[in-house]
Amino acid sequence: MVIDSLVTDLLAGAISFFMAALFAHAGASKWRSPEAYQETVAAVLGLALAAGGVRLIASVEIAVAALVLLPVSRGVGLLASGVILIAYAGAMGWQLRQGNVNLRCGCSGPASDTRISPELVWRNVLLAAGAFWATAGALPGQLETTALAMSLSLALLCIYAAADQSIQNRQRWLRGVNP
């Protein structure tokens, strides 16, 4: 029973640190290069709201990252990250349904050439499920457990980056561009 609880706490902690890093990177990227995201945001909010929308989204993403990092607000931050990821999946799904398949997602920063696709919709749903699940676990305050959870989150970040690069390479290959 104690081992099950420890494993749950470690995984919840790893997912928490992963979500914090993911949202901090997303928000910082939008603040550094808002013009790179305006087309994507304009497709959802309209051209008139695109510039302000990018800044608002960036601010929300950074706030969510901070909420996830603080133990007192971690559950709320994880719920918020899950809801945002579902919203992003829904927006991508809607754009795909409208035939807007060449829209850059901006998922991995302004230099990324990844386009919205069904894989990204499902990836966001899976990430949201992880965030929702992690709300059930509480990260213990022990230094060793926290360090292990942070290490696991780094592994999750590497897996995420590798999967994103694979999706981007596949998309470029389908468009006839050498990766």
Image: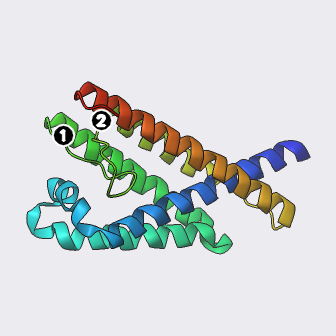
Question: Looking at the image, which is closer to me, 158 or 179?
Answer: 179
**Which residue corresponds to the image point at 67% horizontal and 71% vertical from the top-left?**
71
Question: Looking at the image, which is closer to me, 17 or 71?
Answer: 17
What distance separates the C-alpha of mark 1 from that of mark 2? 9 Å
Residue 55 percent across, percent down from the top left? 29, 73
State how many labels appear: 2
Q: Residue 102's mark?
A: 1
Q: Mark 2 — residue? A: 117
Report the mark closest to the observer, 1 or 2.
1
Amino acid carrying mark 1 in the image: Asn
Residue 146 percent across, percent down from the top left? 78, 62
**Which residue corresponds to the image point at 55% horizontal and 71% vertical from the top-left?**
67
In the displayed structure image, the side of residue 113 where residue 152 appears, left or right: right
Amino acid carrying mark 2 in the image: Ser
Mark 1: few, some, or many residues within 10 Å (few <14, many ≥20)? few
Quarter assignment of residue 19: bottom right
**Which residue corresponds to the image point at 63% horizontal and 59% vertical from the top-left?**
17
Mark 2: few, some, or many residues within 10 Å (few <14, many ≥20)? many
Quadrant of the drawing holding the N terminus: top right
Give the colour scheme shown: rainbow
Quarter assignment of residue 168: top left
Question: Looking at the image, which is closer to me, 120 or 167?
Answer: 167
Q: Residue furthest right?
A: 2
**Which residue corresponds to the image point at 62% horizontal and 58% vertical from the top-left?**
16
Tell me if residue 46 comes above or below residue 15 in the rendering.
Answer: below
SS class of the residue under badge 1? Answer: loop
Tell me if residue 166 comes above or below residue 70 in the rendering.
Answer: above
Q: Is the C-beta separation of discs 1 and 2 under 8 Å?
A: no
Q: Residue furthest left?
A: 48
Residue 137 seen from this side: no
